[in-house]
C-alpha cells in the first residue's frame, strides 16, 4: 500500500462504496484519452476543472430568479450551485455513494444558464432556431466552449449528469422521473429541487411577493416553518427513503422521497411557479430583461464580426455563436453591453 500513488489509494477506497455507486476507475472515460492524475481521481479532476472555468466564475453575477437584484442576500446562480453541491454531498455521503462524482455534476449543472434567470432562457428559446435549453447549453459549455473552444474534456459520467439534471418546469417526483445514468446524477437532480424550492421561497418573501402565512399548509405542516427546517426534513427523508431503494439486490435502485414529503415538495414547487416565477416574469424588470436580450441577439446576428473570436467554433451558424456568447453573459455585463451598443436607453440600472 505504501508504494501506491495517492490516486490509486483513493480508487481502492471507492471499492467500499455502495454496490450502486459509480467508481472513478471504471469510468467510461473522456472523449480525448489523458494520462491519469497521480493525486486525484477522474471525478475529482473534473470537479477542479469546472471550478477553475470562466463559466463557473460568471455564475456569481447571474440571476437565479430575481433580475439584477440590488440586495446582497438574494440567491445567485453561484450560491444556488454551492447549495446544490452541499446538499448532494450530504446525501451521497449518507448513502455511501461517490461524493466526488455528485459534487462535480452539481458544480457544473448550471454553467449554461443565461443572464436574467428563466426569463433569459425563455427569450433565447424563442430567438434561437431549434430552441435553447440551459441543461443542453451546460453540456455545450463543458464540451465545446470552455478552454478557448477545446472544452474541459470531462468524464462521461459527469457530462451525463449535467445534461440530464433537469426535466423542465413542474417536473414530478414519481417512479421513472430519472433519465440520468448514475445514482449520483439522481442525487444531484433531487438536490437541485431541494435547493431551489427553499431559497426561492426565502427570496420571494424577502421581495414581498409572498408571505410566510400564505405558503401552502403542507409546507408548514409536513416540511416545516423555516428554510433550515424544510431542508433538513427533505434531506433526511431522501436519505431514509433511498436507503431502502439502494438495498442489495434491488434491480431498480433510485433516489426519491416518501409520498407525504414528495407531495408537499411538489405542492410548494407548484405554488412558486404560480405565485413567484410567472409573477416575476411579468414585472417591469422582466420586460427590460427581454429587451436587453432581444437587442443583443439581433445586434450580434447582424454584426457577427463583433463576436469574440473564441465563439467562432467550426460548423456553427451565426445564430448558434450569438446564443453561446449572449447566454454566457452575466446580468450586469449584458446590461452594460446593451447600453454601450444601443442608441436608445434600454436599462437604467437601479431605476
Image (cartoon, rainbow, N blue to C red):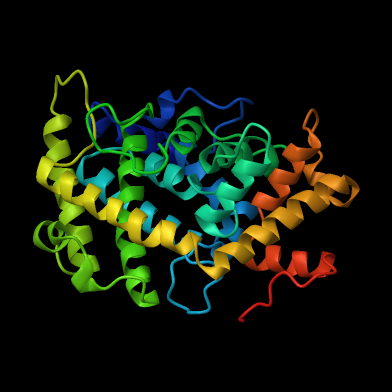
Q: Position of residue 179 (x, y in %)?
A: 37, 27
- Snapshot quadrant of residue 34: top right
Front-lying residue, 87 or 263: 263
Q: Nearer the viewer, residue 39 or 191?
A: 191
Q: Quadrant of the C terminus?
A: bottom right
Please provide percent x and percent y for residue 101.
40, 39
Q: Is residue 71 visible?
A: yes
Give residue 59's quadrant in the image: bottom right
In the image, residue 256 above or below residue 303: above
Report how many numbered discs are placed on residues in the image.
0
Q: What residue lies at 62% left-to-right and 42% top-to-bottom?
A: 126
Q: Is residue 39 visible?
A: no
The image shows residue 229, relative to residue 265, as above or below, that is below
Picture residue at 78% right of the left edge, 35% below the top: 313
Q: Nearer the viewer, residue 239 or 259?
A: 259
Residue 100: image location, x then y, percent: 39, 43
Residue drawn at x 40%, y 43% as measured from the top left? 169
Q: Quadrant of the N terminus?
A: top left
Residue 181 image offset from top left, x and y in percent: 38, 26
Residue drawn where x is 68% and y is 60% of the image: 291
Left or right of residue 291: residue 68: left
Relative horizontal placement of residue 299, taking residue 236 as reference (left or right): right
Amino acid at each position: 500500500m505504501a508504494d501506491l500513488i495517492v490516486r490509486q489509494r483513493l480508487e481502492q477506497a471507492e471499492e467500499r462504496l455502495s454496490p450502486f455507486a459509480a467508481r472513478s476507475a471504471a469510468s467510461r472515460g473522456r472523449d480525448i484519452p489523458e494520462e491519469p492524475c497521480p493525486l486525484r481521481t477522474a471525478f475529482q479532476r473534473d470537479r477542479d476543472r469546472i471550478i477553475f472555468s470562466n463559466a463557473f466564475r460568471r455564475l456569481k453575477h447571474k440571476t437565479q430568479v430575481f433580475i439584477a437584484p440590488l440586495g446582497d442576500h438574494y440567491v445567485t446562480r453561484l450560491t444556488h450551485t454551492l447549495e446544490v453541491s452541499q446538499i448532494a454531498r450530504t446525501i451521497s455521503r449518507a448513502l455511501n455513494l461517490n461524493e466526488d462524482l455528485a459534487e462535480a455534476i452539481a458544480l457544473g449543472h448550471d454553467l449554461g444558464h443565461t443572464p436574467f434567470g428563466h426569463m433569459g432562457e425563455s427569450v433565447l428559446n424563442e430567438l434561437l432556431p431549434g430552441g435553447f435549453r440551459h441543461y443542453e447549453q451546460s453540456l455545450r459549455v463543458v464540451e465545446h466552449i470552455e478552454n478557448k473552444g477545446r472544452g474541459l474534456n470531462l468524464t462521461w459520467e459527469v457530462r451525463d449528469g449535467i445534461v440530464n439534471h433537469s426535466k423542465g418546469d413542474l417536473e414530478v417526483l414519481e417512479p421513472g422521473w430519472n433519465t440520468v445514468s448514475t445514482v449520483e446524477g439522481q442525487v444531484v437532480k433531487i438536490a437541485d429541487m431541494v435547493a431551489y424550492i427553499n431559497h426561492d421561497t426565502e427570496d420571494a418573501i424577502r421581495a414581498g411577493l409572498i408571505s410566510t402565512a400564505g405558503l401552502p399548509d403542507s409546507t408548514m405542516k409536513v416540511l416545516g416553518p423555516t428554510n433550515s427546517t424544510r431542508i433538513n426534513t427533505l434531506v433526511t427523508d431522501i436519505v431514509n427513503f433511498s436507503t431502502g431503494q439502494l438495498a442489495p439486490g434491488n434491480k431498480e435502485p433510485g433516489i426519491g422521497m416518501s409520498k407525504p414529503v414528495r407531495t408537499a415538495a411538489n405542492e410548494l414547487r407548484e405554488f412558486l411557479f404560480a405565485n413567484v416565477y410567472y409573477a416575476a416574469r411579468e414585472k417591469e424588470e422582466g420586460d427590460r430583461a427581454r429587451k436587453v436580450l432581444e437587442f443583443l441577439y439581433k445586434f450580434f446576428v447582424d454584426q457577427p464580426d463583433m463576436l469574440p473570436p473564441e465563439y467562432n467554433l467550426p460548423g456553427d451558424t451565426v445564430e448558434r455563436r450569438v446564443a453561446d456568447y449572449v447566454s454566457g453573459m452575466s446580468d450586469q455585463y449584458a446590461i452594460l453591453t446593451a447600453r454601450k451598443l444601443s442608441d436608445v436607453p434600454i436599462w437604467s440600472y437601479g431605476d
